[in-house]
Image: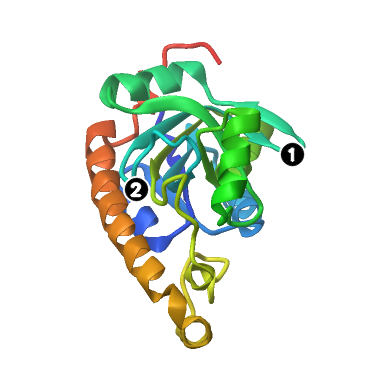
Amino acid sequence: MDHRPLIAVCGLPFEAAIAHGPGVVTVCATGGAVAARLAALLDDAPGCCGIISFGCAGGLDPALRPGDCVLAEAVVTETGSMHAHRGWVDALQARLPRARRGVLAGATAPVADAAAKARLWRDDGMCAVDMESHHAALAAQAHGVPFAACRVVLDPAHRALPCCATAGLREDGTTALLPLLRALASLPGEVPALAMLAADLWSARRALRGVRDDAGPLFGVQDISGGS
């Protein structure tokens, strides 16, 4: 039995809290900070049995709704694509039969505009987007361990993210209150959109807990029988 830990990469603290468990080490960061924290962890640790990107994502496929689960077959960025471990994706699919398989877009900044989301879906066929999965995939590739991504849709494709939603977001996924309040004060018209986002977040968070329970203690990595 492989006793090395599984690393779960998350962008927000509540995602990391859901992912955490026996045998699972979490990395919570956004953007480029993900790569730095993963590198520090992997350099200091005796290794890991796999790296999974876990948390929320923005919907690109119009058919996806808040709370729908996506299992990545690959993650695509402007510089290339990285495939998930097929055996691990199959193991996750067996545990999460309602999950949608597809390609994730790896972004360096939030894709907030509905038109930008539509282009990614129309031109490239990517079904969801996040800012952590491509960093997790690159780290797994560099260290020769399996990679998977399991994401739950937060904001659907047709809905733009309000500008104030990312105000004050720190690299560790926490939010500084003062910048958020300033953004709300300068953009009061975004309050209804922010309230709608909060409702979507509630749906996504509840779904994420269910996904975590169904995925099992180690997200099915122990079921990998081979392949790549």
Look at 56% across and 58% down and name the residue there.
30
Image coordinates of residue 221 in percent, x first then y, are: 39, 27
Please name whichever residue, 52 or 102, is drawn nearer the observer in this view of the structure. 102
Query: Residue at the spot x=39%, y=44% of the render?
Result: 153
Name the kind of residue labelled 1 in the image. Answer: Glu
Q: Quarter holding the N terminus? A: top left
Q: Is residue 1 visible?
A: no
Residue plotted at (38% across, 27% down): 100
Please say which color scheme the image uses.
rainbow
Residue at the spot x=40%, y=66% of the render? 193
Image x and y of residue 16, in percent: 38, 55
Residue 130 in the image: x percent, y percent?
A: 54, 47
- Where does residue 213 sit, x and y in percent of width and height? 22, 39
Residue at the disc numbered 2: 19
Pick whichever of labels 1 and 2 is earlier in the sequence.
2
Q: Badge 1 is on which residue?
A: 78
Relative to 106, say whether 147 is above or below: above
Most extreme residue toward the right is: 79
- Does the image show residue 10? yes
Q: Which dot marks residue 48?
A: none
Q: Quadrant of the C terminus?
A: top right
Classify mark 2: helix, strand or loop.
helix
Foreground mark, 1 or 2, reads 1
How far, Cα to Cα, is label 1 from label 2?
Answer: 28 Å
Give the residue type that dot 2 points to.
Ala
Disc 2 crowd, CA 10 A, few/some/many (<14, 14-19, 20+): many
Which quadrant of the structure image shows residue 171?
Answer: bottom right
Q: Nearer the viewer, residue 12 or 114?
A: 114
Residue 67 in the figure: left or right of residue 130:
left
**Front position in the image: 83 or 26:** 83
